[in-house]
Image (cartoon, rainbow, N blue to C red):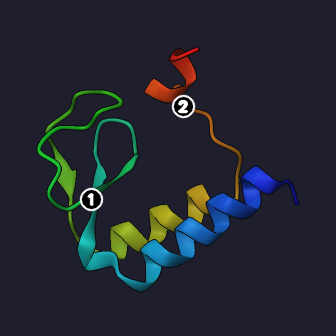
């Protein structure tokens, strides 16, 4: 398992143990902190805050490489 994938799996496990602190963006599927007002990736403002959705998305994202372009990817 690559270091990046290991880090994602570790982050996903943390999220899955405290799903009430997070929500899933309905625009792009990113997991955001519950206090976020808009998604920084796709600028959506629709979220699924159910613990089941957060856990399911965390497990899905935690077992694959990142596929989104983030702000960090654009800064050089």
Q: Is residue 20 visible in the rendered structure shown here?
A: yes
Q: Which residue is mark 2?
A: 68
| Mark sitting on residue 43 | none
Q: Residue at x 36, y 68 (%)?
A: 54
User: Where is residue 57 shown, x and y percent of the image?
Assistant: 46, 61
Q: Element at badge 2? A: loop
Image quadrant occupied by the N terminus: bottom right
Residue 38 is left or right of residue 3, and the answer is left
Q: Nearer the viewer, residue 13 or 71?
A: 71
User: Where is residue 5 shown, x and y percent of the image?
Assistant: 74, 55
User: Where is residue 60 shown, x and y percent of the image?
Assistant: 58, 60
Q: Residue at x 20, y 33 (%)?
A: 44
Marks 2 and 1, how far apart in space?
A: 17 Å
Q: Is residue 70 visible in the rendered structure shown here?
A: no
In the displayed structure, would residue 50 be above or below residue 69?
A: below
Q: Nearer the viewer, residue 53 or 33?
A: 33
Q: Residue at x 20, y 65 (%)?
A: 49
Q: Earlier in the sequence, mark 2 or mark 1?
A: 1
| Mark sitting on residue 33 | 1
Q: Residue at x 43, y 85 (%)?
A: 17
Mark 2 vs mark 1: give the one in front: 1
């Amino acid at each position: 398992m690559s270091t990046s994938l290991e880090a994602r799996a570790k982050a996903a496990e943390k999220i899955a143990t405290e799903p009430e602190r997070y929500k899933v963006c309905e625009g792009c599927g990113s997991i955001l902190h519950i206090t976020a007002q808009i998604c920084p990736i796709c600028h959506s403002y629709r979220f699924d805050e159910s613990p089941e959705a957060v856990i399911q998305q965390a497990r899905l994202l935690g077992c694959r490489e990142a596929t989104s372009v983030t702000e960090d990817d654009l800064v050089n």
